[in-house]
Image: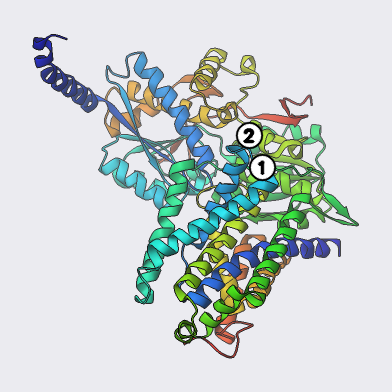
């Protein structure tokens, strides 16, 4: 029973960052119809920005986090302005290939700048874990969960309660009509891509200190983000949030009770099942953009 | 500078360039196939830096057979497919008559068919899967201990430490699974119970699920096989889960000082089977060589933590140089023959190759020393047992 509780607690902690990764990706796909293959690289860049902010810039851990997220936001805006804006209206495959290329450039860039050896980010949290009865959790991971939930809440608020969010949702439903109603669609695209990128960077900045930072760290993260997005339904923000927790649960219980060697396979087994039985995702909305 | 000397400058440069070119053409090229990116990047980079020290030392003393050594270093990306491709490239395109590599067991095993294809020998510096020297590949010469040898060296300590029941957590590849199997065999022979055998992907960063399971088991000890980066994460995650059991790691790629630096107090009390004792140079088999190597390592500005890994690259290149010397020529066949006559004292014991594997196509296996060290209050000590 204790072991099961510990698995559930692990799920909660892991799920928060998975959700963050998934939301960023699904947002960009839903609104821009762009499959963002730089998502994993942006996750990596977020982690390295955090590393730089803490070590080279000497910012405190808590000041470094918003710095890294802001860095991701800016990089996302630059990527949109430099690559996606000129390609707007181009074939989806063309955009996809360009994004794959950009992802490789970003990943190789981190390798070139920082080398292949993993870096550790120091944190101000105590080594001793927080004991909650029979289970325990590290303070750092608790903070990561808290920060992830705050960011998810913030994203939700931005999309559903602000004028920018309203414009984003209008663009999501029908970008031509939104443009006719006076929405600056080009700006919405840039804002969306920047926001999605900042969420990927945030996930990297939060998980970098939990694990270690290395140039290829985004590869698996990106695959998982795609898994979460498919699970929750393409373009569905709430679905992605819940999908993140479902993936974490499947990995934890799969590794705990079936076989730890297949931990990463568990998530993909679920995706295959979802694609076979409910191809629009578990939480797909009735309407889809055309 | 006078006008005439200025006029001579281009000719001089040309002459220098030509002589540099001809010296390079004469250099004996050694292919180095190591993981410089991917999950094993830290370890592979250390090995390469150790190799460079050996090559520079040998070249400063006049080289081998009157020719200098040149390392051709390629990154196998911690990926077996890449490792095989790198070996092919080194042999066919760079014309290296001998190789060193490929760090991980799965990487080395992937390279081995290429060695047979091109009849080129490889010095295996780190890999510990038993299969490498028992599968009948006569082009493999290994200076690192296979896990069975490691288990054998650890056997006398089993009772002294007081192991009753052991769980395993191993990296899910030839190295990890091989180590778990060899140690299980040895422990069972000693009457020690073996419980869970958990595995983790080589790139896995979150092992909480496996650790939660191990926390619930009734074993007193966890034996872990993984490289330094994953060990660091494991110790941190064990501390976070409140998992307090005796931990013994195998495989010799722990770099205890890096663990102390990155995992801090979470690593206290852990024990590690390693193949080098740089903390106590006077206790190593060749104190003079150890002192030179560590001195040179520090002089180059590398972190001390790397020496437990990099010494293999150093000894590996020295073994290759000895093989070239003994073979008497810098071609693949002569070097391969030369390996069988290599005999010198490396940083962790004598380097000479005994025949291993099926008769008629034996591989070479050297028998290095294995040590047990413990991290105690942020220091590496040899525990009194």
Q: Who's the residue at 84% across and 51% down the image?
A: A130
Q: How crowded is mark 1: few (under 14 residues within 10 Å), some or many (20 or more)?
A: many
In this orientation, does residue A248 appear?
Answer: no
The answer to whether residue A49 is left or right of residue B185 is: left
Secondary element under disc 2, as helix, strand or loop, is: helix
Q: Percent from the top left, x then y, of residue B279?
A: 65, 21
In the rendered image of this protein, does residue B22 appear above or below residue A67? above
Q: Mark 2 lies on which chain?
A: B
A20 or B21: which is nearer to us? Answer: A20
Q: Who's the residue at 39% across and 68% down the image?
A: A85
Q: Percent from the top left, x then y, of residue A285?
A: 60, 87
Do badges 1 and 2 share one subunit?
yes
Q: Mark 2 points at which residue?
A: B258
Give the Cα separation between the discs numbered 1 and 2. 8 Å
B259 or A286: which is nearer to us? Answer: A286
Give whichever of discs 1 and 2 has the lower sequence position. 1
B239 or B111: which is nearer to us? Answer: B239
- Image quadrant assignment for residue B25: top left
Q: Who's the residue at 54% across and 47% down the image?
A: A214
Q: Which chain carries label 1?
A: B
Q: Name the residue under label 1.
A: B232
In this orientation, does residue A149 appear?
Answer: yes
B156 or A125: which is nearer to us? Answer: A125
In the rendered image of this protein, does residue B366 appear above or below residue B168? above
Q: Are marks 1 and 2 in contact (CB under 8 Å)?
A: yes
Res A110 label: none
- Image quadrant assignment for residue B75: top left
In the rendered image of this protein, does residue B226 appear above or below residue A189? above
Q: Give the quadrant of the C terminus of chain B.
A: top right
């Amino acid at each position: 029973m204790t072991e099961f509780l510990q698995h559930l607690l692990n799920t909660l902690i892991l799920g928060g960052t998975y959700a963050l990764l998934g939301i960023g990706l699904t947002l960009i796909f839903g609104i821009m119809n762009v499959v963002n293959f730089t998502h994993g690289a942006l996750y990596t860049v977020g982690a390295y920005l955090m590393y730089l902010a803490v070590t080279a810039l000497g910012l405190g851990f808590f000041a470094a986090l918003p710095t890294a997220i802001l860095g991701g936001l800016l990089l996302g805006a630059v990527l949109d302005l430099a690559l996606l804006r000129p390609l707007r209206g181009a074939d989806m495959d063309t955009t996809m290939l360009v994004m794959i290329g950009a992802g490789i450039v970003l990943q190789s860039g981190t390798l070139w700048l920082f080398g292949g050896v993993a870096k550790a980010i120091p944190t101000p949290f105590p080594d001793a874990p927080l004991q909650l009865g029979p289970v325990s959790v590290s303070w750092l991971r608790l903070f990561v969960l808290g920060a992830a939930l705050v960011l998810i809440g913030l994203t939700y608020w931005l999309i559903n309660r602000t004028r920018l969010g309203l414009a984003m949702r209008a663009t999501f439903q029908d970008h031509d009509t939104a443009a006719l109603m006076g929405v600056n669609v080009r700006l919405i695209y840039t804002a969306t891509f920047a926001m999605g990128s900042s969420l990927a960077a945030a996930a990297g900045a939060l998980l970098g200190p939990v694990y270690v930072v290395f140039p290829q760290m985004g590869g698996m993260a990106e695959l998982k983000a795609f898994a979460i997005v498919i699970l929750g339904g393409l373009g569905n923000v709430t679905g992605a949030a819940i999908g993140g927790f479902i993936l974490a649960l499947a990995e934890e219980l799969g590794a705990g009770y079936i076989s730890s060697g297949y931990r990463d396979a568990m998530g993909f087994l679920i995706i295959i099942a979802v694609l076979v039985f409910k191809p629009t995702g578990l939480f797909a909305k009735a309407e889809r953009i055309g | 500078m006078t006008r005439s000397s200025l006029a001579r400058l281009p000719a001089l440069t040309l002459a220098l360039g030509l002589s540099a070119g001809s010296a390079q053409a004469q250099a004996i090229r050694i292919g180095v196939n190591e993981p410089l990116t991917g999950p094993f990047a830290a370890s592979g980079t250390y090995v390469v830096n150790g190799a460079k020290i050996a090559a520079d030392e040998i070249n400063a003393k006049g080289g081998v057979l009157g020719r200098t050594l040149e390392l051709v270093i390629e990154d196998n990306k911690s990926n077996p497919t890449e490792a095989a491709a790198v070996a092919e490239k080194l042999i066919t395109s760079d014309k290296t008559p001998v190789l060193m590599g490929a760090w991980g067991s799965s990487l080395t095993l992937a390279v081995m068919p290429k060695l047979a294809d091109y009849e080129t020998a490889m010095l295996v510096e780190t890999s510990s899967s038993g299969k490498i020297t028992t599968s009948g590949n006569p082009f493999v010469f290994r200076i690192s201990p296979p896990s069975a040898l490691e288990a054998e060296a650890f056997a006398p300590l089993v009772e002294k430490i007081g192991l009753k029941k052991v769980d395993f957590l191993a990296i899910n590849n030839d190295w990890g699974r091989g180590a778990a199997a060899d140690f299980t065999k040895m422990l069972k022979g000693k009457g020690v119970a073996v419980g869970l055998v958990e595995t983790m992907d080589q790139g896995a960063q979150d092992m909480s699920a496996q650790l939660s399971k191990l926390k619930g088991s009734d074993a007193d000890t966890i034996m872990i096989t993984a490289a330094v980066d994953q060990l660091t994460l494991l110790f941190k995650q064990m501390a976070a889960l409140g998992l307090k059991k005796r931990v013994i790691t195998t495989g010799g790629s722990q770099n205890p000082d890096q663990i102390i630096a990155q995992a801090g107090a979470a690593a206290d009390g852990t024990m590690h089977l390693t193949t080098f004792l740089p903390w106590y140079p006077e206790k190593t088999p060749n104190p003079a060589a150890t002192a030179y190597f560590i001195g040179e390592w520090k002089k180059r500005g590398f972190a001390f933590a790397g020496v437990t890994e990099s010494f293999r690259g150093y000894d590996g290149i020295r073994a290759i140089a000895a093989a070239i010397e003994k073979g008497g020529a810098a071609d693949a066949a002569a070097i391969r023959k030369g390996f069988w006559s290599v005999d010198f004292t490396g940083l962790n014991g004598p380097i000479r190759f005994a025949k291993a594997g099926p008769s008629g196509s034996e591989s070479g296996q050297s028998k290095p020393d294995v040590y047990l060290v413990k991290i105690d209050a942020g220091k590496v000590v040899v525990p009194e047992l």
